[in-house]
Image (spheres, grey):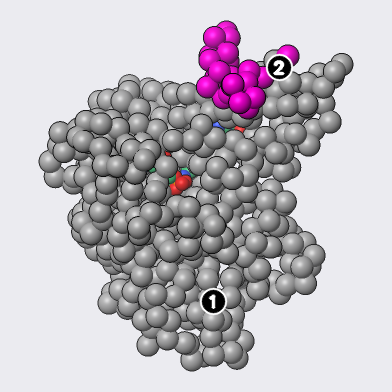
Amino acid sequence: MSSIPLILQAEAHPGRTAIVDREGSHTYRDLLDASARAAAGLLAGRASLDGARIAFLMPSGFEHVAVEWGVWRAGGIAVPLTAQHPKPELAYELDLLKVEALVAHPESRALLGELAAERELPLHAASELLRAAPAALPDVRPERPALVVFTSGTTARPKGVVLSHANLAFQVETLVKAWGWRADDRILHVLPLHHVHGIVNVLCCPLWAGACCEMHAKFEPETAWARLAGGEITVFMAVPTIYARLIAAYEAQPPERRRELSARAAKLRLMVSGSAALPEETLRRWRELTGHVLLERYGMTEIGMALSNPLHGERRPRHVGQPLPGVEVKLRDEQGRPVGDGQPGELYVRGPGVFKQYWENPDATAASFVDGWFRTGDTAVLEDGSYRILGRNSVDIIKTGGYKVSALEIEDVLLKRPEIAECAVLGLPDPEWGERVCAVVVPKAGAAVSLDELRPWAKERLAGYKVPTRLVTLEALPRNAMGKVSKPEVLKIVQRMP
Ligand code: MCA
Ligand code: AMP
C-alpha cells in the first residue's frame, strides 16, 4: 500500500493507456508493475531507501517514468539528469547530492559508467531494474522528499530544489482542476524531463488524470506538427521558443499543407505557454495559424505554477493571469512594504506547492523566504486584476529557450581561458530565444579571443544553452562609482553595436 498521491491516482485506472513512446503503448498497470519492480531492484532486500538520492539519465519515455516512480516507491529521492549537461556539470550534481546509485539507459551507459566508477557507485541498467523480482515496498509518506531539480541562482553554482510528494501532489492537482484535465486527454510531450515544466505540467498532470502522455525524446518541429495535426492530441504545452520554431516550420510549408495544419491544430482542446515571457507577436501569429489564444501561465522550479490565465474567460496578452487555487501571491517593494495596484513590486508566493529547502543550503533557503513567503526575484505588476511579469530583479539571471541560466556561472568558466582577462555575460533580447547568451570579454595584453575557439571549449564545460552565441571584445569594462562592473552600461554598449 503506497501513500504517494500520484501512485494512488494511477491505481484508479489500471487499464487505460498512460504513456505512448517510440516503443509503443503502456498502460497504468504496466507503469505500476514496472515501477514496483524497479523499486524492488533498488531496495535489494532493504526495507526502504530512506531518502537516498538515485540519479538516472534516460531518454524521454516509459522507462524513464518507471525508474522515477521506482525510486519514489522505494523511498528514495529521484534525481533526473540531462544529457545536455557535460560531464563536469553532472559530476557537480552527483557530488553535491551525495548520490547513492545511478541508473543508465544504453545511450547513457558509457558516460554514467565513468561517473559511477570514479565515485565507486553502483550503476544499474534500467532494463534489468524493470525486470527485478517484486518485493514488499515501504509506505512512503507524502511529506517525504521526492525530487531534486537543479536551478541556477545568482550564485555561481546551481542549487538543488527539494520537492516533496505533497508539493508535487498539490502542484499537479491545482493544475488538473484549473485546466480541466480529463481522462480522455492526450498530451504531446516534447520538453526535457529535468525541469518542472516537463515533469509536473506535462507528465504528472496527465498521469494524475488517467490521461495519456505521448513522449518524444526530442522536440523536432516537423514531427511535432505531424502529431498536432494527427487528430489524437488534445493538449499541448511548451516554452515560447518552441512556438516560435513551430511558426517558422509552418511558414516553410506549401499553402495547402498550411491550411490542413491550421484546421487540425484548431481542434485541440488547450494550448499553454510558459517558462518565459510569451512575445506578443508569437501569441498573435499562433492565434492566426491555429485559432488558439495561448494560455500563458507563470511558474518557477521552487513553487510550481503560481499564476495562470483562465481556461474559460479572457486570456490577456503579456499577462499571466491570477493566482491558481490554493496559491497566495503578493507584491512588495525593496523595503518589503506592500505596493498598490498598477505599481511594480517583487512577487512573493506562499502555498502547499512551495518547496521547503535548497539541498543542504540553509543560507540560500533562509535568504529566499520572508515570514513563510517565498521571494521569487521577479518583478510584477497587477493591472485590472491580472498580473504582468516585468522581468527578473537580477541582471545576472538569463532566460534562454526557457532555461534559466546564471551569468556568473558562465563568467567563472570563461575566466579559465588563458586569453581572457575580464568578462561580463549578458542576456541579449532575442525574438526566438527570449534572450541569447552574450559574452563581453577583455582579452589579456596581446591575446585575441574568437567565438569559434571558445564555443567547442565551453561546450565541454557548460550545457549547450549556456554556451555564448555572441562574443563582443572591449578594451575595458565600464564600472560604476563603487568600481564594480556595470552590466547595464555593458548592455548599452553592446546594443549600440551593429
Ligand atoms: C540551443 N541553441 C541555442 C540555444 N539552445 N542558441 C541560442 N540560445 C539557446 N538557448 C542552438 C544550438 O547551439 C544549436 O546550434 C541549435 O540551437 C539547435 O540546438 P538544439 O540543442 O538542437 O536546440 P533544441 O533542442 O532545438 O532546443 C531548443 C528548445 C530547448 C527545444 C527550445 O531549448 C528546450 O527544450 N527548451 C525548454 C526548456 C524548458 O523546459 N524549460 C523549463 C524550465 P548549432 O547547431 O549552431 O550548435 S522553467 C520551469 O520549469 C518553470 C517551473 C516554468 O515556469 O515552466
Ligand atoms: P526556473 O527557475 O527555471 O524554474 O524559471 C522560472 C522563471 O521563469 C521565473 O522566475 C520567471 O522569471 C520565468 N517565467 C516563467 N514563466 C514565465 C512567464 N509566463 N512570463 C515571464 N517569465 C516567466
Residue nearest the viewer, comparing 15 with 148 = 148
Residue displayed at 80% across by 33% down: 417
Q: Which mark is residue 240?
A: none
**CB within 8 Å, label 1 to label 2:** no
Ligand 2 shown in quarter: top left
Q: Quadrant of the C terminus?
A: top right
396 displayed left or right of 177 = right
Residue beneath disc 1? 51
235 displayed left or right of 359 = left
417 displayed left or right of 275 = right
For marks 1 and 2, the one nearer the N-term is 1
> Could you tell me if residue 102 is visible in this image?
no
Residue beneath disc 2? 476
Queried whether the magenta region covers residue 492, the answer comes back as yes
Residue nearest the viewer, comparing 72 with 349 = 349
Residue nearest the viewer, comparing 104 with 442 = 442
Give the quarter of the image for residue 390: top left
Residue nearest the viewer, comparing 425 with 477 = 477
Give the quarter of the image for residue 109: bottom right
Q: CA distance from mark 1 to mark 2?
A: 49 Å
In the image, what residue type sits under mark 2?
Ala
> Could you tell me if residue 420 is visible in this image?
yes
Which residues lie in the magenta part? 475-498
Above or below, 108 relative to 390: below
How far across and how far down the image is residue 308, in percent?
Answer: 25, 45
